[in-house]
Image (cartoon, helix red, strand yellow):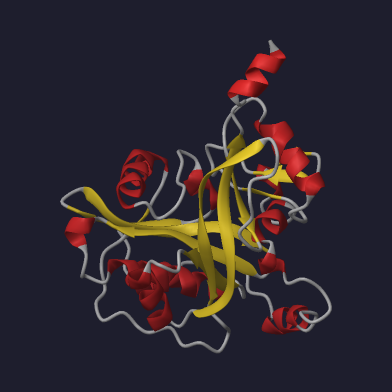
Amino acid sequence: MHRASNFASTSRRRRRRRTALAHKDSSRNTQMHPLDNPIWNALGTKQSHFAENYGILRRFPPEVTPLGGFPEANEEGFAAVRGLLASGGGLGLFLPTRMEAPEGLEIMLEGALLQMILENDAQLEPSRHSHDFIELGEADVADMVELATLTKPGPFGTRTREMGTYLGIRKGGKLVAMAGERLKLPGYTEISAVCTHPDHLGHGYAGFLMTILANCIRERDERPFLHVRPENTRAVQLYERLGFKHRLLSHYAVFRAAKPTAAHAITET
């Protein structure tokens, strides 16, 4: 069991100079920002050990997360998606804008996606209350999946916790809140799977866990960021109170291979 101050003080992350981040951001105007294509960039850098490559497409193992990415949403990229999904399954992509499903694919789920970032000069709002919490591990996976399935903070599989540090709060032995790290790329770490059991809302658990994670990320001289559905106003307002700013409005879509039409099936036979 941890208290917030003890967890932060025992972090063994190596510090890097903040000037390195400032130097990186000086190139924003001359090239695409790495957070404009975070999945692709994560799988090509700090999370390359997870990468499964299909042509120009990179994806995580499905049991880690069903997310993948490509350099651009063009014919070459979607040709790789079609090849990957020909044998079944689905793939989640972050896209610049909403688009119709390319030939041979269909969209199972889609929606707007708001990216928010905690800037270096933002002051995290201190939690009004401190709570006992734990770092979640292999023994907690079943409870983590159960909570994520109930609350639907985003895709969460049996190996998602391998992507980074996950923290949780238990009450009466039951996991009632959690938050963790998902995408990691140089200078940035995403906070994800922020969720609270509906019977335990109103205690500030989500903001408390996020503040601890954000402080640990900052101790590594990285910037926390996150993704949220913009219609989830309760979550957006929480993140704004914590100091996160709107950075990018994009789109997410989960693709699968299109089922053959009746006419196509007759032609094939």
Residue 244, above or below 157: below
Looking at the image, residue 106 sits to the left or right of residue 80; the answer is: left
Q: Quadrant of the N terminus?
A: bottom left
Residue 173 in the image: state x and y as whole percent: 20, 48
Q: Position of residue 176 (x, y in %)?
A: 25, 55
Residue 212 x %, y %: 41, 71
How many labels, in total? 0
Outermost residue toward the right? 30
Q: Residue at x 80, y 80 (%)?
A: 27
Horizontal arrangement in the rendering, residue 119 relative to residue 133 (left or right) = right
Q: Closest to the observer: 102 or 123?
A: 102
Q: Can you say whether 190 is above or below 29 in the image?
A: above
Question: Residue 242 falls in which quadrant of the image?
Answer: bottom left
> Which residue is at a point 66% across and 68% down the rendered structure image?
35
In the image, residue 233 lies at what x, y percent? 36, 72
**The one of 230 and 224 positioned closer to us in this rendering:** 230
